Image: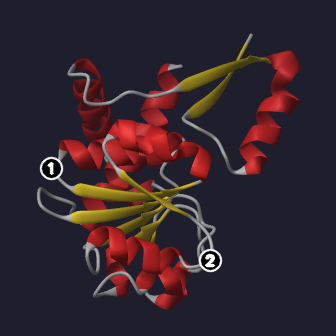
Amino acid sequence: MAAAAGVAGETSERGLRLLDVDAGDTLFVDGGAGGVGAVAVQMALARGAKVIASVSEANHDYLRELGATPVLYGQGLADRVRVAAGGSVDAVLDVAGKTAIEELISLVSEPSQVVTIANYTAGQAGARVTGGGADSRPMEALALTADLLARNKLVIKVQTFPFDRAGEAYRIIESGHVRGKLVLVP
């Protein structure tokens, strides 16, 4: 289960660092209830940012509990984000890869203020794509994640499944409605 915290923490820290999210910024997280999205939301809030995140209707209360403003994903998303933000946002972190990159770019002043971990063609539109590698600072990210966990500024919901229920876990992931991280255990 510690791996769930490490991977989500490193990915979230990397995205927020690349976007230079800081106190007073408004961040939009596309896919805010999943394993990486929920961690990114909490890490951004710990930095003092205002966070708006897309989720299904079923996850609105969960995002509010974390401290973010939820918006329903799908048709008209950019308009709902602008209303929640009172205008444009400073940065977009796409962890879902389901919203058209042009729509996400329309929320910020520069395409480079959109970072995605899930849309590998987004670079063609000027957004930044990160998958780790040279962008990663794993030791820094793990230290930050551990610190936030220790100070109760970060909570990671983990659902465990025995190996014989791996198919069920996979179907949940495929549905796109994961809340937190799913972990297979012996």
Residue contact at pointers 2 and 1, CB within 8 angstroms: no
The residue lying at 47 percent from left, 48 percent from top is 37
Judging depth in this view, the residue of 85 and 117 nearest the camera is 85
Q: Which residue is mark 1?
A: 48
Q: Secondary structure at mark 2?
A: loop
Q: Position of residue 124 (x, y in %)?
A: 53, 88
Q: Position of residue 151 (x, y in %)?
A: 20, 22
Q: What amino acid type is highlighted by mark number 2?
A: Gln
Q: Position of residue 55 (x, y in %)?
A: 54, 54
Which quadrant of the view contains residue 25? bottom left
Please tell me the numbered disc located at residue 23: none
Q: Is residue 154 left or right of residue 164?
A: left
Judging depth in this view, the residue of 80 and 180 nearest the camera is 80
Judging depth in this view, the residue of 71 and 119 nearest the camera is 71
Q: What amino acid type is highlighted by mark number 1?
A: Gly
On screen, residue 109 above or below 53: below
On screen, residue 96 above or below 152: below
